[in-house]
Amino acid sequence: MAVPTPGSKIQIESYKHNGSLHRVWESSLVLKGTEMVVIGANDRTLVTESDGRTWMTREPAICYFHAKYWFNIIGMLREDGIYYYCNISSPFVYEDKKVKYIDYDLDLKIFPDMTYTVLDEDEYEVHRKQMNYPEVLDRILYNHIEYLQKWVQQRKGPFAPGFIDQWYERFLTYRW
């Protein structure tokens, strides 16, 4: 399997369960690329929504994708601390210089004090019915919300002290 090379640029594409394109992050810099994990970074990158609307991210972000877990984690560096936005999603695939995943609406927002809230359960329910998610998928997604909550509580992976700062420092060594 091809893996992205550190220092290369990739796009990030999220899809919906029915295969429709949901959102595209135009450019992220690869900091680590293996078959299991991709860590990328971006700052003020263009994001295009499925309806064609565009916007720019506001702050530097470290993006963590895993091939085993049904979530991805974005650590956003803001003046008052690191905020995390976690998408409950399929594991990533890498092809054509793009990291791709299916976004399943459910999100976990984590604040600098490591408190968190689950978001978009209503949106998930609508799409679950519209796109006829199988029951096994529903169980997988809610199990991975629990895994993610344990990671936060245990300060594991991207939630470990210094993780985001370390990768951000590496990002700054590249000419972006």
Image: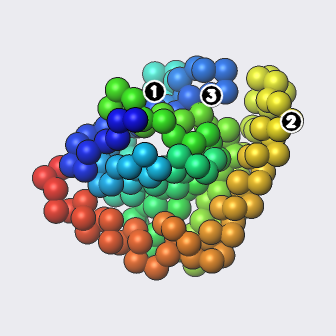
Q: Which residue is mark 1?
A: 53
- Per the model, the C-alpha gap separating discs 3 and 1 is 17 Å
User: Can you say whether 106 is above or below 99 in the image?
Assistant: below
Query: Looking at the image, which is closer to me, 168 or 78?
Result: 168
- Per the model, the C-alpha gap separating discs 2 and 1 is 33 Å
| First-in-chain label (3 vs 1) | 3
Residue at the (58%, 54%) spot, across then down: 86
Label 3, residues with CA under 10 Å away: few <14, some 14-19, many ≥20: some
Question: In the image, which is nearer the foreground, mark 2 or mark 3?
Answer: 2
Please report contact status of discs 2 and 1: CB closer than 8 Å, yes or no: no
Q: Amino acid at mark 1?
A: Arg
Q: Amino acid at mark 2?
A: Glu
Residue at the (26%, 45%) spot, across then down: 5
Question: In the image, which is nearer the foreground, mark 3 or mark 1?
Answer: 3
Q: Picture coordinates of residue 79 (x, y %)?
A: 38, 71
Please report contact status of discs 2 and 3: CB closer than 8 Å, yes or no: no
Q: Which residue is mark 2?
A: 135
- Per the model, the C-alpha gap separating discs 2 and 3 is 17 Å
| First-in-chain label (2 vs 1) | 1
Within the image, what quadrant is residue 143 found in?
bottom right
User: Can you say whether 100 is above or below 151 in the image?
Assistant: above
